[in-house]
Amino acid sequence: MALAIPRKLVVLGDSGVYGWGDPEHGGWCERLRRHWMGLPEGPVLYNLGVRGDGLERLTARLPAEVSCRGELRRQRPQGILLAVGLNDSARIGRSDGRQQLAPAGFLFGMQQLLRQASAIAPVLVLGLSPVDDAVMPLAEVLWYQLETVRQYEALLEEACLEADVPFLPLLESFLADPYWLQRLDADGVHLSSEGHALVYEKVRTWPALLRWAQLETLELAQPST
């Protein structure tokens, strides 16, 4: 009997997807990959996070990254998860400097990316994690600001609503915890292991992703890992 071909999910994003800040478990995306590997019908997950990526760089690498991850001839991944925007929100050189990608350009670029990606496979989009203004700048040049991150997550949600793409917001759920700063790395931008654990739990139990993965029933019986 031929073995069933597992569904494949490509996760495109920045250092958050890559797993920076979580040396023990490799980040939320790696945690999800390992969890799915332990399920009898778990999808295959490709972590394609690149540190420093913003919307424009991610868009440029989308076609090639996705097209070569089909495993079998003439097949492509069945899903794309996008996690981008934090780097675009950063101001350059000073706290009132220009953003790496202005809000209007970010919204337009996200709308274009969603159209492009949706033509390849079903798309899902992840929201943004918080930053600590008090320890900026990052690398002495990039100023990440919480209110700007909130603005960019709202733009992500707007683009997803227009395109009818599932969106999982993160920011407000982080900020609802009075100890949310403990979920950040010392640099104030990247997540700590605790932060990655929180995102992992939210993504693992995200109804839209469970439906895509066809794991809704199975996950109810699975303990968290």
Image (spheres, rainbow, N blue to C red):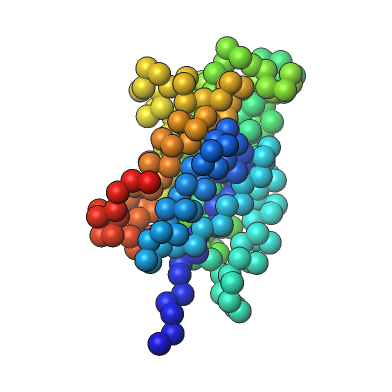
In the rendered image, which quarter is residue 101 located in? top right
Front-lying residue, 9 or 58: 9
The reply to whether residue 16 is in sight is no
Instruction: Tell me residue 160's x, y (percent).
Output: 46, 46
Q: Position of residue 128 (x, y in %)?
A: 50, 34
Res. 176 image quadrant: top left
Please give the count of numbered marks on the rendered protein: 0
Q: Is residue 195 above or below residue 33?
A: above
Question: Outermost residue, front direction?
Answer: 24
Q: Position of residue 5 (x, y in %)?
A: 46, 75
| Residue extending furthest toward the top | 134
Give the position of the N terminus as an image quadrant.
Answer: bottom left
98 lies left or right of 13? right
Q: Residue at x 42, y 77 (%)?
A: 4
Kindly identify the residue that appears in the image at 57 percent across and 12 percent down: 134
- The residue at 52%/48% (across/down) is 30
Is residue 23 left or right of 222 when viewed as pictured?
right
Q: Residue at x 58, y 70 (%)?
A: 70
Q: Is residue 138 in view?
A: yes
Along the line of sight, the residue nearer the viewer: 6 or 117: 6
Residue most extreme to the bottom: 1
Asked where in the image residue 142 lies, by quadrant, the reply is top right
